[in-house]
Structures are given as structure tokens and as C-alpha cells.
Amino acid sequence: MTEQTEPDEGSNDIRTPILAVVGRPNVGKSTLVNRIIGRREAVVEDKPGVTRDRVSYDANWNGRAFTVVDTGGWDPDAEGLAERISAQAEVAVGLADAVLFVVDATVGITDTDEAVVKVLRKSGRPVVLAANKVDDQRTEAEAFALWNLGLGEPFPVSALHGRGSGDMLDAVLAALPETPEETIGHELGGPRRIAIIGRPNVGKSSLLNKLAGEERVVVDDASGTTVDPVDELVELGGRTWKFIDTAGIRKRVKTASGHEYYASLRTATAMERAEVAVLVIDGSQSISEQDMRIIQTVRESGRALVICFNKWDLVDDERRYYLEREYERELVQVQWAPRINITARTGWHIDRLIPALDAALAGWETRITTGALNSFLGRLVAEHPHPVRGGKQPRILFGTQAQTSPPTFALFTSGKLDAGYERYIERRLREEFGFVGTPIEIQVRPREKRKR
């Protein structure tokens, strides 16, 4: 297991503490996660092995924020997992600050539970033991048998009904490290935060090394060398930038091996901390479905975006022709992102990255006054009114920019707008005001009909 180093006390690297929820299949981990986050997001089904996809959630208890990672059940008898169970558990626990170990109190201690306990002890991470499915006082006695696991006091809880969850969460907060309150957006005087993302082996670490002017990140022909995000302060153009070199996003999370599974979670965490993402694509290869999924992740995160086509020295005239066609066809949803062609290995054209980052960050933080916006909307509707649907024609009554980073607009209307008309509004906003390098969010708020 890779040793996880703790940040220095004086470091300004602020991140939300991570709590890994672990246990064997069907002990109620996802139900407990839903109870912790206060909403039904984790998929719950009465059969083992359901948790595969979205596994990372924001949680808050008593004013303290933390991230909950809902892991898949550890089953030593599952096909292909018998030999890897210990290694996968080590990776999961190694990336967390604390562990919530869930055991079914009605079943008691199983061989699988004891196997997981060995991994938890070896990790040295603080562990909170949840004795789940204690639905009433009569079954509380069954929870006390879990003292025999040697992990300290078991907290009897009912994930289904919420019984005992408050005491358990108090123990979780005591186990997690304290973090200073995070400043939203750009910290005053702090460096801009850039996440370097992309598939494995496209040259992300080579780009960071060339920008830093020295060998700071391990570079190897074997894909997936970088596992944990690496923060580097780099002086460029007379300014300091904070670059996060993330682990390569290899494939869909549900089909990734344990090592890649948790590396992709750390990449998502890095995206949350960044202001702009630099997506590195291998220009010598076709734009892949994986590249498209990463772009979708950036759009959903609301971060600014710059696209770098790397390994340009391997791109001949024929490949350039096809790449242009792929770019126009596959990346039509992010045509607003600045695009640069580079060769990270030699440093060719990487000086173009800083102007692209400046443009993307400026677009991300652009604010339009309410007067200018409504004047623009008035002209837009006069030139191209919304189509009539079912004898009705929705009108835009008023608009305002609710926030920046990313630019978010609230439109108050007389009815629901067509998705095509929303895309038209976004396109015209970009033509009029720029918004280079940033997604735009449009929130339509139809006027409620008055009750008679």
C-alpha cells in the first residue's frame, strides 16, 4: 500500500475529510450512507453487490462537512476477488481519513468481518464500528457481542429507521481530522487551482514536469503510474499556479479494478478543488468514449475547461484532417473551450497554456448586469420568439445572473421553455458576451398559476 502523507500544518491545501464506509455485502452500507447524507442517492436493493457506480457523496453533520465514500461489499468468495480482496481493501482504506465499518448485528461476526478487521488494523486508520439492523432495544444486546472484534465500542444503529445514527455520527466527527473553513472560489491572494486530467498515458505528468522545469512527477510508459493527485506550485508568467496532476481516468468506475476505482474517486475530489480543468488528449489517437465521459464530468462539475491535444509531433497531415473532423463531431458540446496543440515531452507550444487558462478563468468569472441581460433578452425574443406549443407561447418575463463560477442565469418565464430554445439562448449569450472556456447553466423558473 502506498503510504499516505499528511499535509503540513502550515499548508493551505484544504480538502474535505474522507470517510470510507466498508463492510461485507448486504449489511446495509448504502442505506446507512443515505441516512448520513440525508437523502436517497446511494442505490439500495436487497441483494449483495448492488453498489458499483456513483460512490462519493457530500455530507454534513453539526456544521462540519466531509465526503462519504460508499464502497462495494467485500466478498472473498466472489469470482476474481478471492486473491485481491485484501489489496482492494487496503487501497480503499488508505485513501480515507477514517473508516466506518458496518456489521450486521443480527448475523454477528463472520469470517469475512474478521478478514476485514485485519486490514483495518494494519492500515492504522481510525475506525468507527456500526452495528447495523438494531431496530429496537431488544436487539441491542446482539450488538454488544461485536466488542469481540477488538475495534472498540460498537454503535448500535438502524440505517432503515435512523435509530442511534446521531451518536454514531458524533463518533465519526471525532475520528475525522479537523479542517479549516474553505473559501469558496478564488482565495484572495492565493494561486489559481488547475487540475490536469485525462486518460492514462496521454502525457499529463510530462506536461506538469515541463511546466515546472524539473522532474517532479514519475513518468513511465506504463499507463496509470500516477495514483494520488499531486499538488505542485509552479511559477509561470510571473505568477504562482497550483497544478493538480490527477490519476488517469481509465474506464467506467464500475468496471475498474480496485486500484483504479479509488484513483478515479481521488480524480473527482481533485476536480472539486480545482477552478479550471486542463484536459489532455493524445492527438495521435482517435478521440475515445473515455475522453467524452471525462468531458461530461467536467461539464457537470461546473469547472472552466482548456483542451490540450498532446503528442503533436506524432500528428501527420492525414491525422490532422481526421482530428479536425473528430473535434467538430465529438466535441461539439465544448466548442467554447480554448484548444491548444502541444508536445509536452519537448515543451513545444506549452507557453500557449497560460493565455488559454487566463481566458477560461475570465469567462468563468464573467458577470453581466441585470440591465444588460434583460436588454439582451428583449432583443433576442424580438428576433426569435419561442415557438408556439399546444396553442401556448412561453415568454421570458425577466432574467438575472444568479452567480459566477460558473455563470448561472435564472430566467423567470410564463411557461416551460423547450430544451432547443434554452440551447439557442446559451449560444446567443456566448456570441454577445464571450464566456470563453466555461459552461453556462440556465435555470428556467416558470411562473406558478394563481389559485382561484
Image: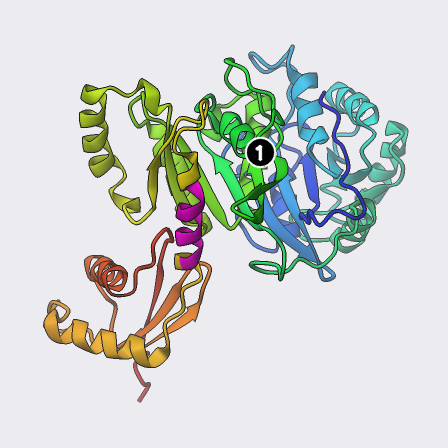
Query: How would you classify the magenta stretch by its main secondary structure?
Result: helix
Q: Is residue 125 visible?
A: yes
State left or right for residue 153 relative to residue 52: right
Q: Position of residue 402 (x, y in %)?
A: 43, 71
Residue lying at the far front of the rendered structure:
238
What is the secondary structure assignment of the residue under circle 1?
Answer: helix
Residue receiving disc 1: 212
The total of numbered circles placed on residues is 1
* Residue in the picture at 61% in, 56% down: 38
Q: Quadrant of the N terminus?
A: top right
Which residue range is magenta in the image? Answer: 353-362
* Residue in the picture at 57% in, 49% down: 239
Which quadrant of the structure image shows residue 450?
bottom left
Q: Nearer the viewer, residue 182 or 416?
A: 182
Say few, some or many: other residues with alpha carbon within 10 Å of mark 1 (under 14 / 14 to 19 / 20 or more): some
Residue lying at the far bottom of the rendered structure:
452
Q: Position of residue 135 (x, y in %)?
A: 73, 47
The disc labelled 1 sits on which kind of residue?
Answer: Ala
Compared to residue 300, the image places residue 374 above or below, namely below
State left or right for residue 190 relative to residue 100: left
Q: Position of residue 429 (x, y in %)?
A: 27, 64
* Residue in the picture at 68% in, 37% down: 21
State left or right for residue 356 relative to residue 54: left
Q: Quadrant of the C terminus?
A: bottom left
Compared to residue 254, the image places residue 304 above or below, namely below
Q: Position of residue 288 (x, y in %)?
A: 32, 27
> Per the image, is 211 magenta?
no
Compared to residue 326, the image places residue 225 above or below, namely above
How was this image coloured? rainbow
